[in-house]
Amino acid sequence: MADLAAARLNMVESQVRTADVTDLRIQDAMRALPRERFMPEGRAFQAYADLEVEYAPGRWLLKPRDVAKLIQALRPLPGEAALAISAPYAGAVLEALGLGVTQIDAADDLPAGSFDIVVCEGAVTRAPTAWTALLATNGRLGVVERVGPVGKACLYVKAADGVGRRELFDGFPPLLAGFEPELGFAF
């Protein structure tokens, strides 16, 4: 277990801090939270590697760098309500930051209500409008959108007059099962 604690510290120092994640609360939460808790049986050794890890069929944890950058862009505040969609690690980090977190799988029915933050750890081709509809005014959605080989981490922000979208950084997570692009034919 001591080796995993050292790996967790090294993950923050070499993958998170060096990626311009300057929010010390996020760094502290990631130092304290055992990421191996989210790994499948026998794969705890991958918890702190610089890669996406499949924790269930068609479900992926983002690289530590990417999840930290995405959470920082969401500007989480204690007391806010968050929805973690197929995002067990991101949800746990947000919970450690003092947010009330509802965890669901992307295949589950969406909960009623509105959220200050919605986050997803797998890639989708485009954020579903049902997800942005869950945002409270000034709510933020963090997700990686991917159609080709390179995805873009995106931040959606809901204002009184609509929803804005901004690209944050490149990411390469696999697409969530059920969110693959629809193939079609164009004339």
Image (tube, grey):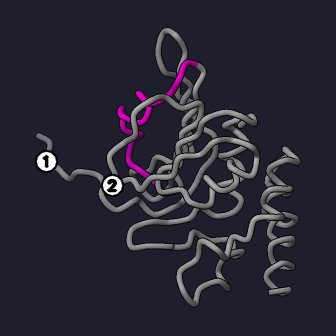
Which quarter of the image is occupied by the N terminus?
A: bottom right
Q: Nearer the viewer, mark 1 or mark 2?
A: 2
CB within 8 Å, label 1 to label 2: no
Please state which amino acid type lies under the numbered disc 2: Ala
Residue 141: x %, y % from top left: 54, 36
Q: Is residue 99 magenta?
A: no
Residue that extends furthest to the bottom in the rendered view of this protein: 42
Residue in the foreground of this view, choosing between 145 and 130:
130
- The answer to whether one can see residue 40 in this image is yes
Please state which amino acid type lies under the numbered disc 1: Phe
| Marks 1 and 2, how far apart at CA | 27 Å
Residue 49 is left or right of residue 170, and the answer is: right
- Badge 2: residue crowd in 10 Å (few <14, some 14–19, many ≥20): few
- Give the residue at x 30% y 57%: 178
Magenta residues (range): 122-137
Q: Based on the displayed image, in which of its 4 quarters is residue 153 positioned?
A: top right
Which quarter of the image is occupied by the C terminus?
A: top left
Sooner in the amino-acid sequence: mark 1 or mark 2: 2
- Secondary element at image label 2: loop
- Give the residue at x 41% y 50%: 124
- Badge 1: residue crowd in 10 Å (few <14, some 14–19, many ≥20): few
Mark 1, residue position: 185
- The answer to whether one can see residue 152 in this image is no
